[in-house]
Amino acid sequence: MRRILTGLSVAAAIAFSASVVQAEPKAEVMHWWTSGGEAAAVKVLKDEFAANGGTWTDMAVAGGGGDAAKTTLKARVLAGNPPTAFQMKGPSIQEWFEEGVLADIDDVAKANGWDKALPPMIAAQMKCDGKYCAAPVNIHRVNWIWANPAVMKKAGVSMPTTWDEFNAAADKLKAAGITPLAHGGQSWQDATVFETVVLGFGADFYKKALVDLDEKALTSDTMIKVFDQMRKMRGYVDANFSGRDWNLATAMVMKGEAAFQIMGDWAKGEFTAAGKKPDVDYLCAPTPGSGYLYNVDSFAMFKVKGEDKVKGQKLLAKLIMGPKFQEVFNLNKGSIPVRTDVSLAKFDACALKSNADLKAADKAGTLLPSYAHGMAMRGAISGAITDVVTKHFNSDMSSADAVKQLAAAVKNAM
Ligand code: BGC
């Protein structure tokens, strides 16, 4: 009997060591990239992961802006079953780190020279207590207008550069029977439009209101004007806007059913996936005002058990920061590479404009984090702001009341 047991344990030990030696990289990757352009982009990563011997388990949770994915993540972490990697960005990386659940990928970063390849500000956001815990993929610009040139021509309007010009163009389009603004009534899309309106009243005002959360700015006459403009915007959307997904709004512009969409350059990923060309089939232009609202996608790694998963995380991190991957992924995604050493030779005019404006904004001090896309503040505060923005957009709340509620919401959430 004893011999059998000994024999068994030797066999088990051999099997165990064999499994250790053979541990293949595995990753369950949770993200919200489900639209045409997004899916094409994430496929680049999936394919590269597989080509390097990895097994990818896809956990796509549909819902633009990631609200649904973030809710699912919370439930998974609470249940003690986090994914290997999550599409996480901005201050929420620090929030999750404080919960003690993020893994350290500093060895991958050191071995692959991340500190040299990344802008210092972005490198800092990817670090938890000085060590890398997340890998960045791209830089998306949020403050863009996507437009249909044929429809604009038909109505005799040109690209607006101020909100007054925008309103004048929108009134003309409306009179010509064209929906001026393709919009999906989901709170994160309302927030996306809102932050571009805030920026239109000055980069300095944006910083005071949505980065510093300065009470004076939040309750100012300028903020009243912001809500006045949001009320105008509400009049420029079609009757079926409620609940519409952002990519369907992009499709409205593509098909000439609407003239403009205000959306980050993941919208360009939709045009690209449909074979459309900038300056021919569609136009891209910054929303009114000067400045650049940035949104950096990244993947944070969770503490997981099992050598296969740890290997999976390290492989994933290495691939995400690979120069070739950053080129191909971003050509599909609509964004620009976050690595500073990737050639933009294959990128289109909108991407080149994004890159040039990013550099100019950095010099001018007008490079600003997107509040609507989780780059500017902790989730509780941005959520409180978005609640007010959405409530105002979907009711007849006055601008004065919205401003009062905004300041109170921020105070409560701090
Ligand atoms: C993400 C993008 C994504 C978009 C729409 C943003 O918050 O940063 O990567 O394409 O939401 O889902």
Image (cartoon, grey):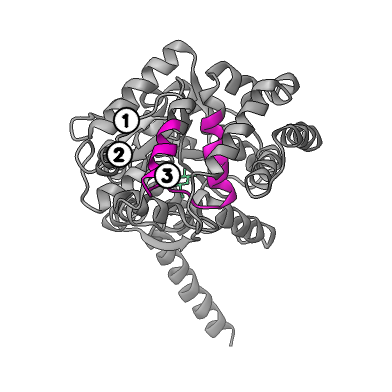
Determine whether label 1 and label 2 are within 8 Å by CB.
yes
Q: Quadrant of residue 90?
A: top right
Q: CA distance from mark 2 to mark 3?
A: 11 Å
Which is the main secondary structure of the residues drawn in magenta? Answer: helix
Q: Position of residue 409 (x, y in %)?
A: 77, 37
Residue 319 seen in render: no
Which amino acid, by three-letter code, is at mark 3? Lys
Residue occupied by mark 1: 158
Q: Quadrant of residue 353?
A: top left
In this rendering, is residue 13 above or below 84? below
Residue occupied by mark 2: 152
Q: Which residues are magenta?
A: 168-197
Instruction: Please check the rendered image and state whether residue 307 is part of the magenta-colored stretch, yes or no.
Output: no
Q: Nearer the viewer, residue 180 or 3?
A: 180
Residue occupied by mark 3: 174
In this rendering, is residue 80 above or below 93? below
In this rendering, is residue 62 above or below 328? below
Residue drawn where x is 74% and y is 19% of the image: 216
Which amino acid, by three-letter code, is at mark 1? Ser
Q: Which of the image's four quarters has the C terminus? A: top right
Q: Which of the image's four quarters has the N terminus? A: bottom right
Instruction: Give the farthest residue toward the top.
Output: 364
